[in-house]
Image: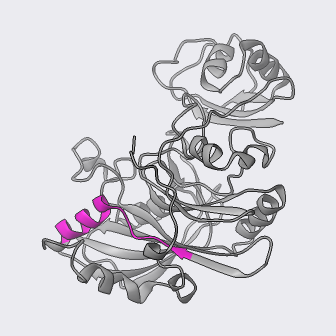
Amino acid sequence: MRMKIDFTICSSFAGQRLDLVVSRSVPDCPRSLAAKAINRGDIRISGQQKRPGYRTKQGDQVTGEILSEDVEITVKSDPRPLDVIHADPHIVVVNKPSGLVVHPGAGRCENTLVNRLVHYFPDIRQVGDDPIRPGIVHRLDKDTSGLLLAARTGHSLTFLQKEFKYHRVEKIYLALVSGSDLAGSGEIIRPISRHPKHRKRMCVNPDTGKPAKTFWQVIQQFENACLVYVRLYTGRTHQIRVHFYDMGYPLLGDSTYQFRRNRKTSQPYLRQMLHAWQIGFRHPFSGLKMGFAVDPPGDFISATAREAGIEGYKESSFWRSLIMPYLSKDMAATAPAAVPRIRPEKEV
């Protein structure tokens, strides 16, 4: 198996040996295996090959992969709540809460979505070649809530990966963006690449960026913000956040992609106001078109209420009347309230 790694050296790891940092950051990776991968050039620092004893610097980008045939990689199961929107022998659709990382990675081995998936669906452990990302077809940022699709068989994984690659999967988001003068609708076609200096961030870069296309339509304008329907045609890292920031309309609550003057000030919301609202795709076994939608969580609805300047927003019919016209026909057949959920009685 090949285990991909991609992380940035933080201040606590700066000055330590590269093989030690990799060993401590990658689940079940002994130092000897890390050193072997570094010596082979499988792991590099900002694209350059280094020795295992290289002293890391803050901001170094560690990328590459580890051949793990000789190491047993085990993702621990986690019985904490998993909001399952749909499950069959081939796929799982879940509603990811904000604050939950999708899969284990550098410095995090537990309390991820994958840990919960393998608890409720143990067969996912065997899906794919990456032991820490079994069944994962696409990802959502840690602080983005909403729908995520996972595969339960190797065939499903391969099929869905191709569907995403060729942009056949419909992905629709709700976003709260700053500013009240955003045009009613439009397309953003701007290439995205990793930021040349801040390696944890992405940026619009016409020279080295990969093609990225985002469509938006304003659902409701408020005094200082807009509730926006967003459709992704590509799936670049942080795409929606980067595109709206580049246009001058950063997402509310986004402390990373924010005007410089606001980066050190406290944000009115604890996370970026972005929710993966709808997803549509062809089923990998039947070939039939499927669609799902799930309402945003309470913090998103409360933020919308605050921007709208009204009370009782969640309980009123106004929220539903606001978003229902933007619900795709394929999604309407599986209204969130009508689908089964796996949710333990006591949430941890």
Q: Answer with left or right where residue 229 lies relative to residue 318.
A: right
Locate residue 18, reporting x and y percent: 65, 17
Q: Does 302 lie within the magenta span?
A: yes
Q: Residue at x 78, y 49 (%)?
A: 127
Question: Which quadrant: the N terminus?
Answer: top right
Residue located farthest toward the front when viewing the structure as drawn:
345
Closer to the camera, 280 or 266?
A: 280
Closer to the camera, 119 or 293?
A: 119
Locate residue 104, reporting x and y percent: 60, 37
Judge whether 194 appears above or below 183 on screen.
above
Judge whether 104 appears above or below 147 on screen.
above
Report the predominant secondary structure element of the magenta stretch.
helix
Residue 224 visible, this angle: no
Locate residue 327, reporting x and y percent: 46, 84
Judge whether 29 appears above or below 333 on screen.
above
Closer to the camera, 98 or 223?
A: 98
Q: Does 323 lie within the magenta span?
A: no
Q: Answer with left or right where residue 215 lies relative to residue 323.
A: right
Q: Residue at x 86, y 28 (%)?
A: 69
Question: Which quadrant: the C terminus?
Answer: top left
Locate residue 325, reporting x and y percent: 40, 89
Q: Which residues are magenta?
A: 292-307
Q: Residue at x 75, y 35 (%)?
A: 3
